[in-house]
Image: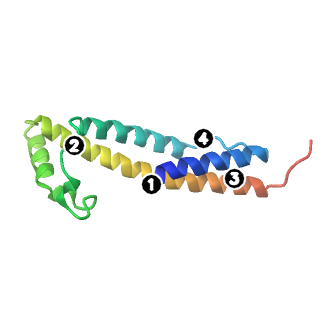
Amino acid sequence: MIILGREFIVTGLRSVAAAEGIVIQAQSIGKLKMWAQCVAIVALLIAAANGNPPVSNFGLDYPAFRFWEVAEVRTAFSNLTTLSLTANDWKVIGYLVGRGALWVSVITAIWSMYDYFTFFFREKQRPQVSP
């Protein structure tokens, strides 16, 4: 919801800025958000290819903060060290990559929205030069 809301807000801000003669170009942080979003979507779709993620909310109340305690994750990383990964281990690793990229996308979405608004208000306060 944060990412979708940010898209609508930034699109609206760009429309208002364009009406006032201010051009807001894409920023590097917005491009990073898009890259992380694409990685997250692809990794999560591959990880849940059979319709279910390889782990169900990691079995924890707050899985983002203690994911290494989950049995499937411990198994995948132990198999990674011995280079004997199973198909499910690949799904678990892909799921971790996808969730990590999704968090990067959410954080950079908020950051880039702040940057866009900062740029807009700075340009709006700049004295306009008549031709």
Are the two marked residues, 2 and 1, in contact with CB atoms closer than 8 angstroms?
A: no
Q: How is the image coloured?
A: rainbow
- The answer to whether residue 8 is left or right of residue 106 is right
Residue type, label 1? Ile
> Circles 2 and 4: CB distance less than 8 Å?
no
Q: Is residue 64 above or below residue 53?
A: below
Secondary structure of residue under mark 1: helix
Name the residue rendered at 10%, 36% in the picture. Answer: 86
Question: What is the crowding at mark 3: few (fewer than 14 residues within 10 Å), some, or many (at least 20)?
Answer: some
Question: Where is residue 114 drawn, in percent x and y?
Answer: 58, 56
Residue named by callout 3: 120
For the residues labelled 3 and 1, say whether their Cβ atoms are less than 8 Å apart: no
Crowd class of label 1 (few under 14; some 14 to 19; many from 20; radius 10 Å): some
Q: Which residue is mark 2?
A: 52
Disc 4: which residue:
26
Q: Quadrant of residue 35?
A: top left
Labels 4 and 1: the sequence-earlier one: 4
Q: Give how far apart the Cα atoms at labels 3 and 1 are.
A: 20 Å
Task: Identify which amino acid the numbered label 3 is placed on.
Answer: Phe
Mark earlier in primary sequence (4, 3): 4
Distance from disc 2 to disc 4, alpha carbons, whole Å, reads: 35 Å
Q: Tag 2: Cα neighbours inside 10 Å, few (<14), some, or many (≥20)?
A: few
Q: Amino acid at mark 4?
A: Ala
Q: Quadrant of residue 60?
A: bottom left
Q: Which residue is mark 1?
A: 107
Q: Is residue 92 left or right of residue 126?
A: left
Quarter assignment of residue 131: top right
